[in-house]
Image (spheres, rainbow, N blue to C red):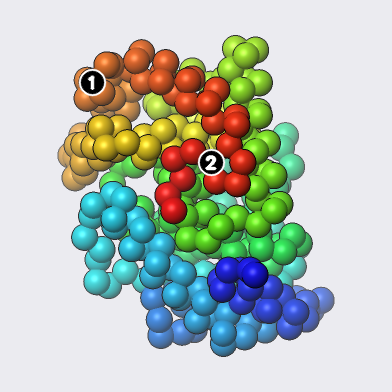
Amino acid sequence: MKPAFIAAILTALSFIACSSAPLPPLGENDFKGTGICQLAVHGFAFPAQSEKAINDSVRQLLERHRVALGFVPKPDFRLRMRVFGNYADYTNATFSLYWTNAADRRALQGRPFTVAGFYTSATKEIVTWKQQMPGFLGTTLLHEASHAIMDAHYDNVPAWLMEGSADYFAFALHPPGELQQRMMRQRWTRLNEWLRDRSLLPLEKLLNATNTDFKHLDPEKAYTTSWSLFQLLMSNNNNRTMMLTMLGERQSLHEKPPECSAQIDRLHYGGLKKLETAWHAWIIAGSSATNAPRGQLR
C-alpha cells in the first residue's frame, strides 16, 4: 500500500491535462491556499486531497527537522510551490525568471539541464514539474521543502549539509518505493567504487565547497557523498552534537563563515582525519544496506 502523500500525488497525476498553449505571465497572485503551503500549478489541475496531503507532509517534515536539529520552528513559516504540467514550461520559466545569475549559467555550461526541481531563497519558492516517474514528484517536493525549512531557520549552511540533509529527509517521512530503494542501493555501490578507485571526493574539498563550487562538482558525486556524510553524522549522538555545534557557530556571523573543515577538525573528538576514516568505514558497511540505508531517520 502506497504512503498517503505519494498516493495522493499519483491521484493528482491521473487528473493532469497538460496545456499546449503559452502560459500567462507568472506572478505573486498565482499562489493559492491557506495552509503552510501555497501552490501555483500551471497546465494541470491539482485535486484538493493532494493539496491537503502536501500540507500534512510538510508539517511532518518540519517536525522531523525540529526533532533532529533542535531548532524552534518559526510560527510564520510558509512554503510556496510552483509546479508546471510539462517539462518545457518548467525549463523556460527556470532560465527566463529564476536562473538569471551569471554564475548559475556558467555552472551549467556544457551540461544538459536535468534538474528535477529547485528551491530559490530569492523568492522563497520551490519550482518543479509533474515528473514522468510515479512518486518522484513527491520526493522532489520533500527534498526542496527541506531546503526551504533550512533556509528559513539557519544562516551560512554549508552546501554539502544543505544537499545531504535534503536527500536524507526526503525519505524520512515515508518508506521509499521499489525504484527509490534500487536507486539508494546503487548509491552505496557507487560510493564503494569511488572509495576503491580513490576517486571519492576528499572530505576537506566537500566540506569547504561554496554553493558555486558545489555546482561545478560532478553532480552524482556531490549529492551522493553529501547524503552519505550527513547520514553518518546523524547516526549517533556524538556526531550529531558536533554537527549541530558547527552549525550553531555559523549563525548570525558578521564576517565570512570559517571553513567548515577547520570547524569540524576542531570540534570532532578525533579531528578531521578520524572523521574521514569513519566515513570511509561507513561507506564500506553501508554497501550491504537493503531497504533502509544505515542511519536513515525512521
- Amino acid type at image mark 2: Pro
Left or right, 274 with reference to 107: left
Label 2: how many residues lie within 10 Å, few (<14), some (14-19) or many (20+)?
Answer: some
Residue 145 % position (x, y): 46, 60
Instruction: Pinpoint residue 232: horizontal percent, then vertical percent.
Output: 41, 33
Nearer to the camera, 60 or 291: 291
Secondary structure type for disc 1: loop
Rendered image: mark on residue 269: 1
The amino acid on which the numbered mark 1 sits, given as a three-letter code, is: Tyr
Vertical side of 161 occupied by 221: above or below? above
Q: Is residue 123 visible?
A: no
Alpha carbon distance from label 1 to label 2? 25 Å
Residue in the image at 41% along x and 58% along y = 148
Task: Tell me if mark 1 has few (under 14), some (14-19) or many (20+) residues whose alpha carbon lies within 10 angstroms of its own.
Answer: few
Label 2: which secondary element: loop
As drawn, 11 above or below 161 = below
Asked if residue 114 lies left or right of residue 232, the reply is: right
Name the residue that disc number 2 marks: 293
Given residues 65 and 35, the one toward you in this image is: 65
Q: On the rendered structure, is 128 left or right of 255?
A: right
Quadrant into which the N terminus falls: bottom right
Residue 211 falls in which quadrant of the image? top left
Question: Residue 220 placed where, x, y %?
Answer: 63, 34
